[in-house]
Image (spheres, rainbow, N blue to C red):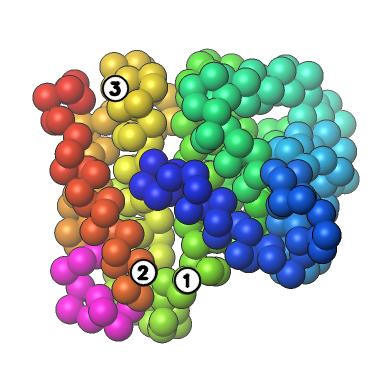
Amino acid sequence: MYFLEGAAINLQTIMVLAQAHLPEGEPLTESTVARAYRGYLADLQPGVPSTPTAETFLVRDEPQAQFLADLFGLQGSPAETRQKAVMEKPSMDDRKVAFFEEGLKRLAQYDPELSALFQMAVKSIFSTPVSPIAGSMTVRAALGVMWVYPLATWATDDLIEAYVHELTHTLVMLDERRFTHYPHYDELDREENLVNSAIRNEKRSLFASVHSVFVASELLQLRESHHGHGMEFRIHPPSRGMREKSLIALESVLALPNIERLASPRLRELLEKTGKQLDAIRPGALGS
């Protein structure tokens, strides 16, 4: 969504959603908008812990991290194993803090506007002591919160891809709250409405597949603009395959017989713009 719409449109969406929380009589600054946005999220999801800073906050409080892990459905291991893991290793140790902060610094070096949008939209990042898989996640029940569990083998650029991946989910969900994306959300999981996805390459609901197309396109644009297509990617597929699957997924979405019923004009406009961005990427530059 950042590479698709730019920083200004996404910031405008945040301001529209947070308008009721903007302080009267104060200048409109990044700080006041950030506070208003956090006020909006607090009203929207009162059970989600608030953050003490206007910028992205790294959660080091163990009870808060465990609460978020439960909310994200990440506490699937047996209770004894979980308890032992928590006792032996914190959710956010010094190594993770240093790595996550390095990722935030690198993101700012890559693109100050992208960094500012990230700091605005993503209010907190948490981790867990253990995880069966490495990766990142956002959920609708905790908008503005991101889970990241990195491996020691991740490079900083891998972490940046995780950041952009989850930022994209967040921005798409915010856009959905400003503009209706799915007029008949209850119909999305019907068998006849399942479509291909861009990352997993499997049949999923329209909501999941649309998100996968946006994420894949944003990652490809990130690579085009910054760290290139030739690095050894650890958490996302190589660029050529990701572009091809994204185009297939997008074609599957737009070919739905009832796409005009399931997807609003705003969503179809975003998808069509994404298709043009994907078409504009030079396949020869993507490697094998």
Of callouts 2 and 3, the N-terminal one:
3
Which amino acid does the dot numbered 1 rest on? Phe
Q: Quadrant of residue 71?
A: bottom right
Q: Are marks 2 and 3 in contact (CB under 8 Å)?
A: no
Q: Are marks 1 and 3 in contact (CB under 8 Å)?
A: no
The residue that label 1 is drawn on is 179
Of callouts 1 and 3, the N-terminal one:
1
Which amino acid does the dot numbered 2 rest on? Arg
x, y percentage for residue 128?
Answer: 71, 37
Q: Are marks 1 and 2 in contact (CB under 8 Å)?
A: yes
The residue that label 2 is drawn on is 266
Q: Quadrant of residue 47?
A: bottom right
The residue that label 3 is drawn on is 229
Residue occupying the point 63% across, 65% down: 17
**SS type, badge 3:** loop
Residue occupying the point 63% across, 59% down: 15
Q: Which quadrant: the C terminus?
A: top left
Of callouts 1 and 2, the N-terminal one:
1
Which amino acid does the dot numbered 3 rest on? His
- Residue range highlighted in magenta: 253-262
Residue occupying the point 65% across, 44% down: 120
**SS type, badge 2:** helix
Density class for disc 1 (Cα within 10 Å; few <14, some 14-19, many ≥20) is some
x, y percentage for residue 202?
Answer: 29, 55
- Disc 1 and disc 3: Cα gap in Å? 33 Å
x, y percentage for residue 133?
Answer: 54, 36
Q: Left or right: 265 with respect to 70?
A: left
Tell me if residue 170 comes above or below residue 54 in the rendering.
Answer: below
